[in-house]
Amino acid sequence: MIEGIKGELIVSCQALEDEPLHSSFIMSRMALAAREGGAKGIRSNSVEDIKAIKERVDLPVIGIIKRDYDGADAFITPTMTEVDELMEAKPEIIAIDATGSTRPQGESLSDLMAKIKEKYPQQKLMADCSTLEEMRTAEQLGFDFIGTTLVGYTQQSKGIKIESNDFELIRKAVETIDKPIIAEGNIDTPEKVKRVLDIGVYSVVVGSAITRPQLITKKFVDAIHNE
């Protein structure tokens, strides 16, 4: 089932509590719309949303839980607690913050990976990274997929744009890392999707450009007022 995402589009169906579409029902319908549009995978946040999506569509799911901890910058499935919760929904892939950002209780990424591998040895894992160095570390730690999800969103990647120099960071990742690369983060046009697939990524995740209508609307409104 996971093999079906190769060379294809994954749509991120997420709406946080402060967003207009926050609802497991709505996200399941969003996933259905994505499937009807040709998406071959879904990325989703929270056990409730994943379960609702899986009841509606038969696509592989990349599951995450976004949770903030005091004194820690890592927030995407940052601890074993979130992994245990996600296993209730049985996503095909679990994505984890694999950046060098501070982690809850000072736990290292390698220690977290060891716990996951011991408890859930068959579970596929995706590393959400922000730099090439982090991607290489994630490969060494045994992640099944390496994502560019957090490029530009961490202190260590501040100012980096994923599309810079014709996706130079992605090209370097494809050239130097053996694990499948999943392009994600500001891949917000069909042209960018096609380009990164041509470069050689395994698959592409698109989120806000498809599933956050408030942000899509804002682009049109900004175009009107910036003339």
Image: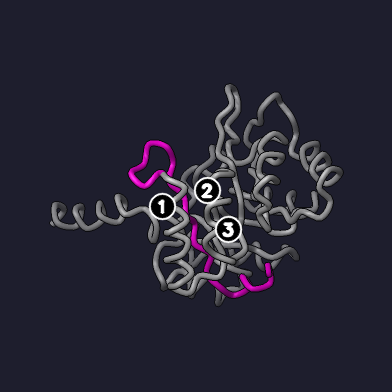
Q: CA distance from mark 2 to mark 3?
A: 9 Å
- Disc with the residue nearer the chain's start (1 vs 3): 1
Task: Give the tally of numbered discs.
Answer: 3
In the image, residue 84 above or below residue 210: above
Q: What residue is pinned by disc 1?
A: 26
**Contact? badges 2 and 3 (CB < 8 Å):** no
* Secondary structure beneath label 3: helix
Identify which residue is drawn at 79% across, 43% down: 116
- Disc with the residue nearer the chain's start (1 vs 2): 1
Q: Is residue 106 visible?
A: yes
Magenta run includes residue 123: no
Q: CA distance from mark 1 to mark 3?
A: 13 Å
Mark 2 neighbour class, 10 Å CA radius: few under 14, some 14 to 19, many 20 or more: many
In the image, residue 5 above or below residue 62: below
Give the extent of the magenta segment: 1-22
- Disc with the residue nearer the chain's start (2 vs 3): 2
Q: Give the quadrant of the C terminus.
A: bottom left
* Secondary structure beneath label 2: helix
- Position of residue 145 measured from the top left corner of the image (x, y, whole percent): 69, 59
Name the amino acid type tagged 2.
Asp
Identify which residue is drawn at 19% across, 57% down: 223
Name the amino acid type tagged 1.
Ile
Q: What residue is pinned by disc 3?
A: 54
Q: Is residue 163 visible?
A: no
Q: What residue is pinned by disc 2?
A: 49
Identify which residue is drawn at 66% across, 27% down: 104
Position of 109 with respect to 45 (left or right) is: right
Q: Which mark is residue 112?
A: none
Q: CA distance from mark 1 to mark 2?
A: 9 Å
In the image, residue 50 above or below residue 102: below
- Position of residue 60 measured from the top left corner of the image (x, y, whole percent): 62, 63
